[in-house]
Amino acid sequence: MHNFFTQQENRRENVFIIEGGDVNHIKNVLRMKEGEKLLVSCDGQSHLCAIKAIFESSVECEILEENYIDSSLNIKLYLFQGLPKSDKMEFIIQKAVELGAEGIYGVEMENCVVKLDSKKKASKLTRWQEIAKSAAKQCKRSFIPEVYPILSYDEAIKEASKLDVFLVPFESKNGMKDTKEALLKIKKGSSVGILIGAEGGFSESEIKKAEAAGANIISLGKRILRCETAAVASLCMCMLYAETELCDD
């Protein structure tokens, strides 16, 4: 079932009105017809709807069941990703959205190969937000996670330290024991920041700053992971913990 996003101002009693580029997608790409069912997500809730009418610049969708599906995690995950080269950030954003991240930050670090000026940062941010939107549609998220403006390392540390739990996958002293202890600090409703190094890894000074800010230095196992693999592994680990250890069942 296809998923589309709209705003509360586009609701008329029991009908959502979809406008913009999604209209062409519904009409000419998917070739959907009146009566076909779809999900319409608005303000963090996804509603089961049926197409009521298709017009030139809008599609009216009648609500069949409100709050039909809730795909949100019971924790809030934020990924702080050291900027990788080429299109790896696009892959990381896509997977972060699929795995339940609330927000994603690109982070400038000492060992980043990529150096972006302000114009390129703005262009990248626009592109990355579109990737987040596309991924949110595909995996039926009830809202579109935010891709925030790129931060310096110090800014990232400051933001991550405001969260309930701050995780940094690195060379932890006690291996997976440290990881297990850090996960136990996560409670239902917790905000969790995950800081992933760039392709060149963390510098010694960056790790010291993270530790001074209260970060939990954890392990992702005995193998050395690429930065994009480390991001996915960390998010998977937290998602699994939230949906098994923190569930109501």
Image (tube, helix red, strand yellow):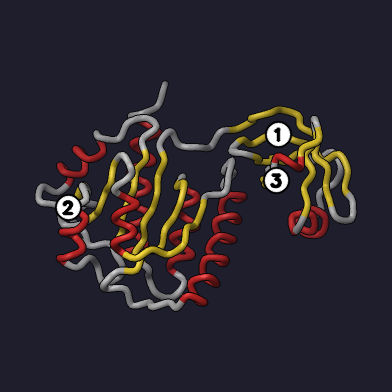
Which x, y percent locates residue 62? 80, 34
Up the image or down, 131 lies above or below 86; here it is above
* Residue 48 disc label: 1
Nearer the observer, 151 or 95: 151
Residue at the image point whose x is 65% and y is 40% from the top = 42
First in residue order: circle 3 vs circle 2: 3
Q: In this view, does 217 lie to the left or right of 190?
A: left
Residue at the image point whose x is 43% and y is 33% from the top = 74
Q: What element carries label 3?
A: loop
Going by the numbered disc 3, the residue's amino acid type is: Thr
Q: Distance between the residues labelled 2 and 1?
A: 47 Å
Q: How crowded is mark 3: few (under 14 residues within 10 Å), some or many (20 or more)?
A: some
Residue holding disc 3: 6
Q: In this view of the protein, can residue 202 be seen by the observer?
A: yes
Which x, y percent locates residue 34? 86, 42
From the viewer's perspective, is the residue at label 3 or at label 1 nearer?
3
* Residue 212 disc label: 2
From the viewer's perspective, is the residue at label 3 or at label 2 nearer?
2
From the viewer's perspective, is the residue at label 2 or at label 1 nearer?
2
* Residue 209 disc label: none
Considering every residue shown, the one lying at the far top of the view is 249
Quarter the C terminus occupies:
top left
Q: Distance between the residues labelled 3 and 1?
A: 13 Å
Going by the numbered disc 1, the residue's amino acid type is: Leu
Quarter the N terminus occupies:
top right
Nearer the observer, 50 or 204: 204
Q: What element carries label 1?
A: strand
- Assess whether mark 2 and mark 3 are in contact (beta carbons under 8 angstroms): no
Going by the numbered disc 2, the residue's amino acid type is: Ala
